[in-house]
């Protein structure tokens, strides 16, 4: 299974779900690395930011529409497909049948298109949501009791097994990471249980109080976006024989509670206030790990995060303040 870098010989990459929280940043990063014209962004609707749908090729694509997916893959002949379109944990609980359909049928469509149309590599994100209330919460191992109890978690666990099956039966080079909550300043997440850790920074910078939907002592594994991008691209560029896990790798960086992120923000903004009003997402958070053992990712392909909580907070606040200043300058 030899892999070469897309963009070096006219090869293209297709990102499905390019308008989402991770998709947007991955599109920007890959366009920087491979050249804008080599990275095709696709989403069910055109993203608001011009960088994603104007700086390089953009295609409207509903991943549930097999014919349209075939058309796009035949047109661009991508070497790699990043399939990121999914309903996250909180949204899928509200719309379970559609959550299952999008998360599973979307994956089947991509895996089948890859096998049938000669795509070399597929990236598909899994999540800490594959674990459940029976899983050891601290330092959750790669291999352990899973038993997820959300539709999102069940679909991710089933998806992991399907990815491994396509690797074994079809030799498809599918790679995957179990992301923790992802935090970035370029875009807002949509419909996850870890979203509070992004929303809280926006409120702090706006000079407003924040009402948190999780309890102050709820610990969850989290990661800053630059680390998530690094992990994803390191995994995709690692030699195929170093990828020993073909379901999905545990991936860790930091673990904190709402109280701790608040204290981290208050180092810069001492007046910032947070109140707590847990909702249905608390139950989801309580069923997930508090911290993750990612030894296998470190051993197999050299994973090493760069950001801890305070370093992330410093960078988030810096960029969000810049964004606010830029918006104010444009409005003047
Ligand atoms: C969610 O909260 O649903 C996601 C995830 C941890 O996969 N951010």
Image (tube, rainbow, N blue to C red):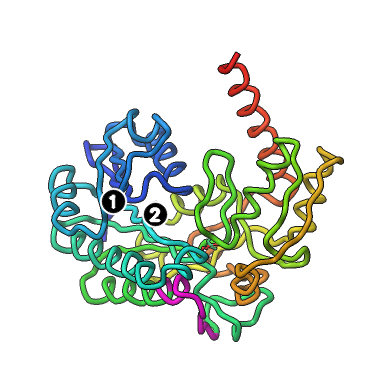
Dot 1: few (<14), some (14–19), or many (≥20) neighbours within 10 Å? many
Q: State if disc 1 and disc 2 touch (CB < 8 Å).
A: yes
Query: Which of the marked residues, 2 or 1, is nearer the chain's N terminus?
Result: 1
Estimate the x, y position of residue 236 in percent, counting from the top left.
39, 54
Instruction: Report the residue at 74% width, 40% height from top.
Output: 208
Q: Residue furthest right?
A: 270
Disc number placed over residue 236 in the picture, else none = 2
Q: Is residue 18 left or right of residue 128?
A: left
C-alpha gap between disc 2 and disc 1:
9 Å
Dot 2: few (<14), some (14–19), or many (≥20) neighbours within 10 Å? many
Disc number placed over residue 80 in the picture, else none = 1
Q: Residue furthest top?
A: 332
Which region is colored magenta? Answer: 145-156
> Quick check: is 154 in the magenta stretch?
yes
Disc number placed over residue 330 in the picture, else none = none
Estimate the x, y position of residue 172 in percent, counting from the top left.
25, 65
Frontmost of labels 2 and 1 is 1
Using the image, determine if residue 247 lies above or below residue 187: below
């Amino acid at each position: 299974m030899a892999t070469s870098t897309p963009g070096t010989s006219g090869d293209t990459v297709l990102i499905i779900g390019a308008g989402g929280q991770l998709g947007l940043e991955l599109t920007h990063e890959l366009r920087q690395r491979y050249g804008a014209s080599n990275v095709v962004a696709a989403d069910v609707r055109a993203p608001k930011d011009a960088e994603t749908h104007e700086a390089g090729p953009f295609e409207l694509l509903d991943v549930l529409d097999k014919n349209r997916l075939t058309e796009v893959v035949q047109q661009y002949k991508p070497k790699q497909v990043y399939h990121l379109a999914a309903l996250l944990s909180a949204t899928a609980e509200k719309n379970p049948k559609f959550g299952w359909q999008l998360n599973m049928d979307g994956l089947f469509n991509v895996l089948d298109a890859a096998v049938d149309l000669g795509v070399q590599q597929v990236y598909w994100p899994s999540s800490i949501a594959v674990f459940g209330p029976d899983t050891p919460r601290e330092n959750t191992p790669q291999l352990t009791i899973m038993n997820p109890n959300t539709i999102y978690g069940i679909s991710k666990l089933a998806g992991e097994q399907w990815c491994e099956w396509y690797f074994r039966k079809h030799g498809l080079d599918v790679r995957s990471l179990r992301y923790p909550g992802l935090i970035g300043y370029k875009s807002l997440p949509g419909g996850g249980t870890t979203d509070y850790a992004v929303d809280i920074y926006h409120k702090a910078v706006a000079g407003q109080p924040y009402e948190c939907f999780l309890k102050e002592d709820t610990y969850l594994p989290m990661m800053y976006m630059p680390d998530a991008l690094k992990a994803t691209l390191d995994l995709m560029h690692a030699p195929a024989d170093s990828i020993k896990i073909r379901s999905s790798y545990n991936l860790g960086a930091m673990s904190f509670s709402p109280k701790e992120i608040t204290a981290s923000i208050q180092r810069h903004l001492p007046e910032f206030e947070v109140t707590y009003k847990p909702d249905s997402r608390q139950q989801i958070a309580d069923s997930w790990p508090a911290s993750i053992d990612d030894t296998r990712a470190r051993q197999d392909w050299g994973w090493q995060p760069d950001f801890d909580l305070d370093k992330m907070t410093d960078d988030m606040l810096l960029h969000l303040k810049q964004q606010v200043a830029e918006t104010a300058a444009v409005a003047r």
